[in-house]
Amino acid sequence: MKKILSKAYWADRDVEKLVGLQLRYGVIISSLMVLIGGAFYLFGYGRMTIPDYTQFIGEGPGYTSVKGIFAGVANLQVKEFIQLGVLFLIATPIFRIAFSLFAFVLEKDKLYVGITLLVLCVIFFSMFGGLKV
Amino acid sequence: MSILTFTIILLIGAYFAGLLGSLTGLGGGVVIIPLLTLVFHVDIRYAIGAALLASIATSSGAATAYVKEGITNIRLGMFLEIATTIGAVIGALIAVYTPTNTIAMLFGGILIFSAAMTLRKKNQEASHEGSKLASLLKLNNSYPTKDGEVSYKIKNVGAGFSIMTLAGIISGLLGIGSGALKVLAMDATMRIPFKVSTTTSNFMIGVTAAASAVVYLQRGYMDPGLAFPVILGVLAGAFTGSKLLTKMNPKALRIIFCVAISFVAIEMIYNGYNHKF
């Protein structure tokens, strides 16, 4: 445990390289999820006529909340599975910030630990601040 | 039209949007909005939702390469992200109270501005004079070139921060990365070398887009039926674009595309003015 928390351990592995990998895998995994969900979506709904996208109605709760998306995926709904990929894609850059926070903590850079926390707070505020109106 | 036909056409369209966005340096999200609204007559709100996802996908995908080369200035990006994320949240908030016609016209204006910005001459020189605030915030850094490490210093931190807030608001309001405004802040105002400013701006685009994307997702702007072909198409197009860029100098292409994009922008403004959104 002590080894994992030491700066030298991470300096060897180069946090930045790790961040790069995290971004790459984030995009790869989310696009694979979207691809798989999309293939099943076409299989199931492909022959139907397209929904009226010219009018904005907004998506139902099944596609707009984490709870709704997970409930849909648990019930094997393909559109919710695509939306899970979407959720994963949005989370990718947010995880990247969390990674940077970790790097700044190891470097004991208090100023940037503060700055990174501030950025994370803004993002969390937009998630849970009830801004959907 | 059946869902299958629509998806295939949109997939091809999104591929070219990603390719065009990558070759011109405008970003995939910017091209997807006129494609969805003008060609497919999709409501601009769904288009914004899809464009945000395209921006996150392309910026995160491209960032991998830049981070490895050590060009991106992480501290600078993180510091300016305070401005862009706050801006993005404000933008997403104002969007509710902004008529879609106004959004379409504003989008057209930003599109012309972005096209002009990509043709502009970039700052190649590393500045050796920095401001006090820049060294206080540890923003001065160096980057690798053919002739070894080049160190640079940063000026006008306050002004750059203000333009970044504006870039964030535009990004949150229109669902685009607003890379052009980010480069304007870093290149023209803070005098950062071009390579550093473009990669750092790309690093920031994903985070800025994510900050407003979480609001738009909850508002129901993101439709899985549109997200699926847009994400995959734009990613594939951007990937092809980045491969092509290493083989050719797209200067002439870039001018043609930017002129074409400006016509599209004028159509967006015209349609917005005539309340067709």
Image (cartoon, grey):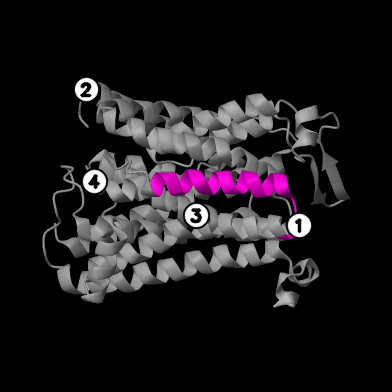
Quickly name the residue at label 4.
B40
Asked if disc 2 and disc 1 are in contact, CB closer than 8 Å, the reply is no
What secondary structure is found at the residue carrying circle 4?
Answer: loop
* Number of marks: 4
Q: Which residue is drawn at 37% across and 44% down?
A: A129
Residue B256 locus on image (x, y percent):
50, 37
Q: Which amino acid does label 4 sit on?
A: Phe
Asked if disc 2 and disc 4 are in contact, CB closer than 8 Å, the reply is no
Quadrant housing the C terminus of chain B: top left
> Looking at the rendered structure, which numbered label has been put on residue B58?
3
Q: Which amino acid does label 1 sit on?
A: Glu
Quickly name the residue at label 1.
A107
Quickly name the residue at label 2.
B274
| Viewer-side label of 4, 3 | 3
Q: How crowded is mark 1: few (under 14 residues within 10 Å), some or many (20 or more)?
A: some
Per the model, the C-alpha gap separating discs 2 and 1 is 56 Å
